[in-house]
Image (cartoon, rainbow, N blue to C red):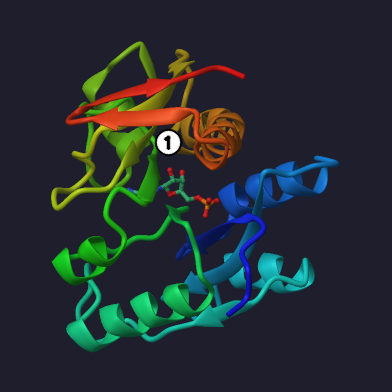
Amino acid sequence: MRLKDNYRVGVLGSGKGSNFVALADAVAADPHPPYEIALVLSDVAEAGILIHARNRGIVAEYLAPGPFRTKLDEAAEAAYVAALRKAEVDLVVLAGFMRVLKEQFLSAFTTKVINIHPSLLPSFPGLEAWRQALDHGVKFTGCTVHFVDQGVDTGPIIGQKVVPVIDDDTAGTLHARIQVAEHELYPAVVRALAEGRIAVHGRMTTWRRE
Ligand code: GAR
């Protein structure tokens, strides 16, 4: 058996992969990175995240999600779990993965799955959270990194970043501003988890800075 010498991260995404790029760039820029990205999986064969990963020499696979629109079917969930176990990941990072993960997956990686969501949870869970914020008329929104539980965007919150909504914002400009905040927050959280600086007590988490 291979002796593990580093904290290994598996990334799941369905889209363009800008959060993956932020994570990979943070690893590349660090002379002593506390984690490595071991594997990228996507439920979308042509997703940008797969191309970005392959361009960086990271193993990246499309795994078919099955017939449902918003979740993986049982066989697909088992395939995702098997691939992540084979890659010996310590943490599963959802970076724009647009399907809900069920019990079979979550029990395989208890308190080891995190997600980034483009609002200040518990406001605006679900799809297109930036558009929900704009439609509601809030003056501040942001992004949240949280542990994933059985609900939709309901797990214990690890970190948040506030982003202002400005008068002429469109859905596109607001999402772009939120993404700048995401690209700062997510690498910081993953680094802190890899360094053992985040603890969970029920719904509460603590984050020891450096
Ligand atoms: C991000 O804004 C992320 O917060 C959001 O999808 C985008 C993925 O962008 N996730 C969700 O809405 C999950 N509910 P990316 O592919 O460029 O990282």
Asked if residue 167 is positioned above or below residue 132 in the image, the reply reads above
Q: x, y (%) of residue 111? A: 30, 48
CB of mark 1 near ligand 1 (< 8 Å): no
The C terminus sits in image quarter = top right
Q: Residue at x 47, y 53 (%)?
A: 95
Q: x, y (%) of residue 182? A: 53, 34
- 15 left or right of 191? left
Given the current orientation, which residue lies at the most extreme right position?
Answer: 31
* Frontmost residue, 27 versus 85: 85
Q: x, y (%) of residue 209? A: 55, 17
Q: Secondary structure at mark 1?
A: helix
Q: Quadrant of residue 74?
A: bottom left
Packing grade of label 1 (10 A; few <14, some 14-19, many >=20) is some
- 144 left or right of 191? left
Residue 117, visible in the rendered structure:
yes
Q: Residue at x 58, y 31 (%)?
A: 188
Q: Quadrant of residue 2?
A: bottom right
Residue 100, visible in the rendered structure:
no
The N terminus sits in image quarter = bottom right
Q: Quadrant of residue 30?
A: top right
Residue at which label 1 appears: 171
- 65 left or right of 104? right
* Frontmost residue, 160 versus 173: 160
Q: Residue at x 22, y 23 (%)?
A: 136
Q: x, y (%) of residue 16? A: 57, 59
* Frontmost residue, 52 versus 168: 52
- Residue type of the residue flagged with mark 1: Ala
Q: How many marks?
A: 1
Asked if residue 117 is positioned above or below residue 42 in the image, the reply reads above
